[in-house]
Image (cartoon, rainbow, N blue to C red):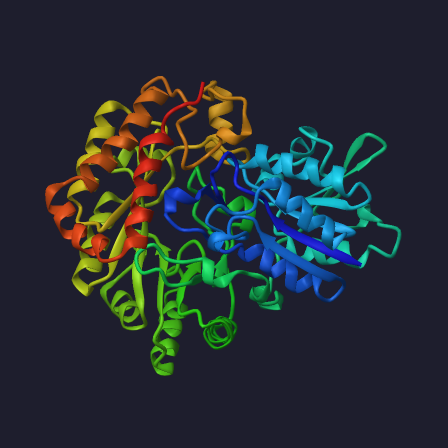
């Protein structure tokens, strides 16, 4: 048996991150992420098949600058001649992902094409109705479902007995029962990074290769806009300390990777475990750097100091808004004062901060927008990201938006956290939300004091200057609708 795992080509020149809840243009992050989930699926597939994995974002000549075109991707698939083709998908890239599946189907008509990701999880059968190119869709966490699919290959493909699947049968879309979340995620294999072009996933500020390390899954917080609890559940499930340290060690020794993004929802949710990871890294005396994300109400000086000592160089904080009413309506379960305190503590211990803001949540007005922009610019953050609220299916915000008629688009690709606003709340227009995102970027990054601090750093690193240019282009264009 042969299996191809594919991260699809750029869409109209745009490369996309397709990793769980993170579905957006590469330019918005100024860095291409390695496809961690595909790497884990490749580790599973190796037990049953001859495997080829390739990420069209980074393959090709000129160091993968332009990625692989669709024609080039098809040629590589044809060369491998697989029995099964696994295609990574996301909402903002879905039209390109579907096109990839359709062309792959033409080139390899006997191969079974399998789609997975948040798109198939949030839409269920609807994900299969837009095109008949996908023979099978995986809902939810893909690993156990994929393994059982491979195991069933020589047993008559009895999909009905495999939880988490959708498939086509006599022009109908069939669906098995839902799959429970994996209780012990330590049983998952470490991603097969030997298939990655590891040297091509680099950080914008230093040009060094980096990778994602899965530390935990799931989030118990009820934020109305978030898809993480839908895809990974409401219960925190973490890897053991031994698992995390083993993967960190393999990345350093086998691939010479020393820069990491700890991929999870809230690093400090299990405070003792977070400190244990830091202590273990310190004890090892590893010369590594890493970034992570957490909630503002779950930090204190001790754990932030430990993180700094263990090599943490960037802390992402979900700030969303400066308006307490919007925060409460969104069920963030946090106070504005928590955000002020968290940023102050990070600054005190010397941790660089990235603040994430969402405009256009219920309760938003022009006044709350101005309050949030002023707050974000003067908070003491090192970097910011700003998004438009997206009414994803299966989220509370999505259900409310459908009930109230807020949604202004019928294209799934417009469900793009890094794209333009597609909700008209009545209290604020989509156009005003898009203007707000540009305005907070302009007022934050174009401050004379900020520019003077960063110009020297940018000028000393041509690669970072190029990435900064891409980010500026994304800031100026991704908030505008395409007619």
Quadrant holding the N terminus: bottom right
Q: At 59% from the left edge and 44% from the top edge, which residue is drawn? A: 8
Q: Residue furthest front?
A: 62
Residue in view at x 75 percent, y 50 percent: 84
Q: Is residue 214 above or below residue 127?
A: below
Between 285 and 104, the residue placed more toward the observer is 104
Q: Where is residue 299 shown, x and y percent of the image?
A: 29, 59
Vertical order, 351 against 69 (above or below): below
Q: Image quadrant for the C terminus?
A: top left
Where is 252 relative to 219, above or below? below
Q: Position of residue 201 (x, y in %)?
A: 45, 57
- Give whichever of 80, 89 is nearer the camera: 80
Q: Position of residue 102 (x, y in %)?
A: 69, 35
Residue 20: % across, % down: 52, 48
Residue at 57%, 64% (x, y): give it. 191
The answer to which of 199 and 410 lies nearer the viewer is 199
Q: Is residue 402 visible?
A: yes
Residue 206, quarter of picture: bottom left
Horizontal side, residue 360 vs residue 422: left or right? left
Q: Residue at x 32, y 19 (%)?
A: 427
Q: Is residue 189 above or below residue 169?
A: below
Of 200 and 319, the residue lying toward us: 200
């Amino acid at each position: 048996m042969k299996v191809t795992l594919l991260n699809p080509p750029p869409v109209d020149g745009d490369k996309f991150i397709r990793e769980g809840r993170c579905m957006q243009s590469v330019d918005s992050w100024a860095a291409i992420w390695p496809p961690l989930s595909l790497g884990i699926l490749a580790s599973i597939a190796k037990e049953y098949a001859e495997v080829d994995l390739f990420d069209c974002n980074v393959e090709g000549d000129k160091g993968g600058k332009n990625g692989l075109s669709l024609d080039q991707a098809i040629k590589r698939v044809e060369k491998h001649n697989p029995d099964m083709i696994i295609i990574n998908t996301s909402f903002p890239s879905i039209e390109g992902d579907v096109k990839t599946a359709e062309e792959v189907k033409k080139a390899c008509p006997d191969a079974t094409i399998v789609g997975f990701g948040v798109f198939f999880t949030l839409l269920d059968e609807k994900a299969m109705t837009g095109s008949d190119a996908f023979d099978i869709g995986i809902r939810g966490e893909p690993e156990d479902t994929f393994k059982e699919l491979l195991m069933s290959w020589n047993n008559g493909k009895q999909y009905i007995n495999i939880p988490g699947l959708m498939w086509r049968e006599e022009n109908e879309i069939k669906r098995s029962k839902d799959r429970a979340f994996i209780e012990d995620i330590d049983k998952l294999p470490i991603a097969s990074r030997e298939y990655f072009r590891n040297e091509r996933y680099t950080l914008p500020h230093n040009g060094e290769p980096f990778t994602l390390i899965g530390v935990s899954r799931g989030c118990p917080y009820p934020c109305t806009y978030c898809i993480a609890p839908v895809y990974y559940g409401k219960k925190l499930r973490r890897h053991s300390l031994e698992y995390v340290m083993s993967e960190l060690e393999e990345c350093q020794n086998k691939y010479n990777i020393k820069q990491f993004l700890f991929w999870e929802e809230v690093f400090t949710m299990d405070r003792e475990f977070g400190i244990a990871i830091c202590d273990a890294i310190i004890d090892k005396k590893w010369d590594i750097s890493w970034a992570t994300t957490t909630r503002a109400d779950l930090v204190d000086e001790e754990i932030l100091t430990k993180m700094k000592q263990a090599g943490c160089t960037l802390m992402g904080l979900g700030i969303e808004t400066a308006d307490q009413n919007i925060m409460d309506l969104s069920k963030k379960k946090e106070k504005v004062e928590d955000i002020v305190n968290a940023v102050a503590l990070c600054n005190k211990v010397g941790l660089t901060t990235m603040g994430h803001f969402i405009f256009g949540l219920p309760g938003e007005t022009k006044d709350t927008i101005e309050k949030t922009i002023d707050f974000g610019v003067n908070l003491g953050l090192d970097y910011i990201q700003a998004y438009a609220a997206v009414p994803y299916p299966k989220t509370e915000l999505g259900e409310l938006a459908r009930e109230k008629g807020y949604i202004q688009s019928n294209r799934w690709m417009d469900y793009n956290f890094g794209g333009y606003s597609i909700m008209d709340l009545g209290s604020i227009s989509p156009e005003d939300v898009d203007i707000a995102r540009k305005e907070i970027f302009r007022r934050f990054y174009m401050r004379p004091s900020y520019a003077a601090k960063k110009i020297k750093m940018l000028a000393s690193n041509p690669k970072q200057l190029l990435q900064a240019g891409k980010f500026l282009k994304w800031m100026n264009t991704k908030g505008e609708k395409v007619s």
